[in-house]
């Protein structure tokens, strides 16, 4: 791999996830690079408009160009287009917010969402991330990874709340349960007051490529409502899977399987 490219992407990712501008020294320390190296990378990225420098000289930030690129990708993502009608129906049937997620290593990325009309609802944003083992959509996808991958993950889980499932044996039992029942439940594992339920979406080869789920205040996800919600998300996942057919979403499936391959190495 091209080391300069890798370092440049590292700078972009660091700035994209930072809530404030970062100085050259901070970037160098965070990435473990020499200041002179970071300075050259920042110059190139600024010229290409991926990075901007704060007017007061306080540091560097990711530019809106990243948003433009991300929006361009999302607008052409077949998965999102095919899922939207079923997500909308799921939101109206349940009254809760609906999320469409894909797996990126140990995190989920929210590629689409439809907010609940309820004034009190779960907050997420498109492009946002969460620990996969702590949210329903993430657990719905993780459960279908190879057993060896799950074994390695189980040894390095970190909690987000006291309810997060991080004990290896318990996590592996949870994955087995999800595979058997076909859906996953989050009981305050990412945010203590938020619960969720989700089901996996598969491609024409049966590979899990995404998940669709509901989330909302924990008090609205009482035990008596979980089975009806589970039926709803499983039906939506089945409809999205059927609507995908065998088209360009295969590229996403390939990318997802490639990530799993990397984790197995």
Image: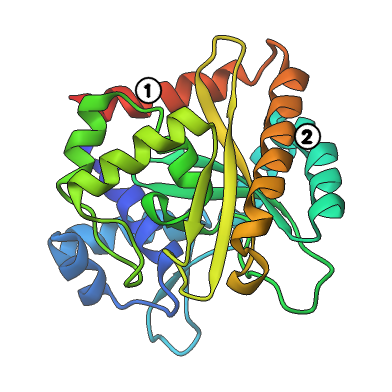
Mark closest to the chain's N terminus, 2 or 1: 2
Q: Position of residue 253 (x, y in %)?
A: 52, 21
The mark total stands at 2
Residue drawn where x is 41% and y is 28% of the image: 144
Residue drawn where x is 32% and y is 49% of the image: 8
Quadrant hosting residue 263: top left
Residue drawn where x is 41% and y is 49% of the image: 132
Give the camera-side residue of 236 and 51.
Answer: 236
Q: Position of residue 182 (x, y in %)?
A: 54, 31
Q: Is residue 23 left or right of residue 102?
A: left
Neighbor class of circle 2 (other Cα within 10 Å; few <14, some 14-19, many 20+) is some
Q: Is residue 219 left or right of residue 180?
A: right
Q: Residue 53's mark?
A: none
Neighbor class of circle 1 (other Cα within 10 Å; few <14, some 14-19, many 20+) is few
Q: Is residue 86 visible?
A: yes
Dot 2: element? helix
Dot 1: element? helix
Q: Work out how far the residue at label 2 is from the one at label 1, CA to CA, in angstroms.
A: 23 Å
For the N terminus, give its image quadrant. Answer: top left
In this figure, which residue is indicated by the disc labeled 2? 81
Looking at the image, residue 146 lies above or below residue 71:
above
Q: Residue 258's mark?
A: 1
Q: Position of residue 192 (x, y in %)?
A: 46, 74
Q: Position of residue 51 (x, y in %)?
A: 47, 63
Q: Residue furthest bottom?
A: 56
């Amino acid at each position: 791999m091209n080391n300069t490219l890798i370092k440049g992407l590292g700078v972009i990712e660091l700035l994209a996830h930072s809530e404030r501008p970062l100085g050259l020294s901070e970037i160098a320390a965070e990435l473990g690079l020499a200041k002179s190296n970071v300075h050259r990378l920042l110059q190139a990225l600024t010229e290409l408009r991926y990075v901007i420098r704060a007017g007061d000289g306080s540091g560097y930030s990711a530019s809106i160009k990243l948003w433009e690129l991300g929006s361009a990708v999302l607008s052409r993502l077949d998965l999102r287009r095919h899922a939207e009608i079923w997500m909308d129906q799921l939101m109206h049937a349940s009254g809760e917010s609906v999320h469409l997620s894909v797996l990126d290593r140990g995190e989920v990325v929210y590629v689409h969402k439809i907010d609940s009309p309820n004034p009190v609802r779960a907050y997420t944003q498109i492009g946002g991330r969460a620990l996969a083992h702590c949210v329903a959509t993430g657990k719905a996808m993780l459960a279908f990874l190879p057993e060896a991958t799950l074994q390695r993950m189980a040894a390095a889980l970190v909690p987000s709340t006291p309810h997060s499932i991080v004990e290896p044996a318990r996590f592996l039992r949870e994955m087995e349960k999800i595979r058997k029942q076909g859906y996953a439940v989050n009981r305050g594992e990412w945010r203590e007051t938020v619960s969720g339920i989700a089901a996996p979406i598969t491609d024409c080869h049966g590979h899990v490529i995404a998940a669709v789920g509901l989330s909302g205040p924990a008090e609205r996800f009482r035990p008596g409502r979980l089975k009806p919600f589970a039926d709803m998300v499983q039906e939506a996942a089945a409809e999205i899977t059927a609507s995908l057919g065998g088209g360009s979403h295969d590229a996403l499936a390939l990318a997802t399987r490639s990530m799993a391959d990397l984790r197995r190495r």
